[in-house]
Amino acid sequence: MGRLLKKITSPQQLRKLTLEELNQLAAEIRTRIIEVVSRRGGHLASSLGAVEIIISLHYVFNTSYDKIVFDVGHQTYAHKILTGRNQEFEQIRQYGGISGFPSPLESEFDTFFTGHASNAISLALGLAEAKRCLGEKEKVIAVIGDGSLTGGECFEALNNAGHLKSDILVVFNHNEMSIAPSVGALSSYFNKLISWPVYNRFKNSLDNLIEKVPGFGRAIKSRLQKLEELAKAVFVPGIFFEELGFRYFGPLDGHNLKLLVETLRRISSLPGAKILHVVTKKGKGLRRAEENPEDFHSASRHLFQNKKSEVKKITYTDVFSHKLIELAGQNEKIVALTAAMPKGTGLDRFAQKYPQRFFDVGIAEQHLLSFASGLYRGGLRPLVAIYSTFLQRAYDQLIEDIALQKNGVVLAVDRAGVVGEDGPTHQGMFDICWARTIPNLAVVAPAYRQDLEAALEFAFSQNRPLLIRYPKDYVQERLPRASFGWARAEVIKKGEDIAILVLGTLLAEAEKALGRVEKEFGLSVWLVNMRFAQPLDEGFLEELAQKAKVIFTLEEGFLEGGFGSAILEFYQRRGILPKLVVERLGIDSQFVTFGPRAVILEKLGLNSEGIYKFVRKKIEALNYGKINFLS
């Protein structure tokens, strides 16, 4: 650990350093981040790019008092290191360690949980207005990235903040290099000029003059404003923000600590809404990350290992990606869409193969689904690839623009169920609960590789909306026993005594558990891959109720309102309950923490051992309790 970094356990100690020492500190922080992420994995490129911004904010502002709100939150590693979590940083994203995103449970310096994009200005604006109403003087700073500006909520908040003239500072971290040439001596000189206190005192004096001598004061101020706007129109891209009611400063070199500190000190006392535009480089300090920031966005520790695995494990995302390309080769009407996640969803390969049939709309999930609906009505077959946690942001559009109108959009929902190290802001546990209640929307959870491929083929054979969910995990291989059909379950094994109905990729874990149950209790067990959470295979379920004495349901989602609830509701409507016993296994309503996927599944009781214990406990209770189902 670096010499200076060892001394820093809070921002108060940071402020004791000289400006000259800050550059050395930045280098030590980058080394620390790279060392830990190379062992643990994590969001690397964005965190390396934001080091100087975070140092300068904690250096200038009293952040025990003033509030920083980070958009998305994956760029906050330097923030965590500087706010008393340097030792715990070794365990970032590990079960029982610290989160890879801001967490108020960890530190007073983390104002909100933030894991999604474009909401930081809204959150910060609420803070600023609350403090105004209460007569408090804390400063409020929102740190956003250029990706945030692709989201509608960000613009809504900018518009509202400018209208309210709220005392808020937005630090706009632009890490696209297209505007890098604007970062030069002239721009720096101009921004120094308009941020000088004497200049701003003069402008404030003019406001007072206008009130006393309206004609004369207004004429002078008008000429001054025209001069400033003309200069900004020539030298800086800030007129848009100015028109929204913000004072604009920038663009500045986001890695120049001296310039950042000087500018923040000058503008921190200015009233009203302000934007500081800084240009940074993703992955700064690690050449491989600078050259390929997308690969190092959420970096696996395997990226840092020189040894190449002899056999590359295939994920469900890989299977989806290759199958979609195959289907697009057979049907030229298939197009693919994503919201700023082409690589994560596997659509990067599709984009290379069919660039004219690929759309990346940015971080704009609501627009994404409505756009896809329009593509379908225009005669195309759109597929939207999206993470489960981000699909939540477009719930209304899924209902109004797709399901209500029966538009045949295919939704490939990646990262469904337990995601792992990204934690509660990214876990995909909600989609079954809310998606299965939407009329006209089929909800499918394939169990293995060939199942997913068949589900995709089936989806494009239908002219109706269909959602396919699958986890961030390696694929299972299995030869299908039944063809993929509408609401058709696949019976893996027939039995007589008990049945377990599985939705999704926990099928293999259930199979291991039931082998032990059969051996221990001498029972004959049904194992069924249900495939559909909506609609259900009602004919099969009615038949099963005549043969099995107890039915277990298993899902990688919330129990409340989930797949198991759908089974209970079906049997209740048919008047089969309470004669038939139905036991549900899934996730109790909670925000699930972070950690490796296998560890989280074990803690939730969703691995083979947990499933076995659950089934055994229920069998023993039924056998020795009021109901003796073995008799």
Image: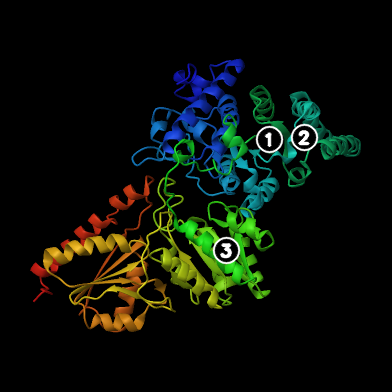
Query: Is 280 left, or right, of 326 in this rendering?
Result: right
Residue 405 higher or lower than 126, as above or below: below
Calculate the distance from the C-alpha at mark 2 to the C-alpha at mark 3.
40 Å
Q: Percent from the top left, x then y, of residue 430?
A: 42, 60
Which residue lies at the image location 54% right of the left edge and 36% below the top edge? Answer: 47
Q: Earlier in the sequence, mark 2 or mark 3?
A: 2
Disc 1 packing (10 Å; few <14; some 14–19; many ≥20): many
Disc on res. 111: none
Residue 354 sits in quarter = bottom right
Which residue lies at the image location 46% right of the left edge and 25% below the top edge? Answer: 10
Q: Secondary structure at mark 1?
A: strand
Q: Percent from the top left, x then y, of residue 157?
A: 64, 50
Q: Quadrant of the C terminus?
A: bottom left
Labels 2 & 3 near each other (Cβ < 8 A):
no
Q: Is residue 414 visible?
A: no
Calculate the distance from the C-alpha at mark 3 to the C-alpha at mark 1.
37 Å
Q: Earlier in the sequence, mark 2 or mark 1?
A: 2
Q: Amino acid at mark 2?
A: Ser
Location of mark 3 (residue): 325
Which residue lies at the image location 39% right of the left edge and 54% below the top edge? Answer: 418
Which residue lies at the image location 42% right of the left edge and 34% below the top edge? Answer: 39
Q: Quadrant of the N terminus?
A: top left
Q: Percent from the top left, x then y, of residue 6?
A: 44, 19
Query: Is 72 left, or right, of 218 in this rendering?
Result: left
3 or 1: mark nearer the eye: 3
Location of mark 1 (residue): 279
Labels 2 & 1 near each other (Cβ < 8 A):
yes
Disc 2 packing (10 Å; few <14; some 14–19; many ≥20): some
Location of mark 2 (residue): 182
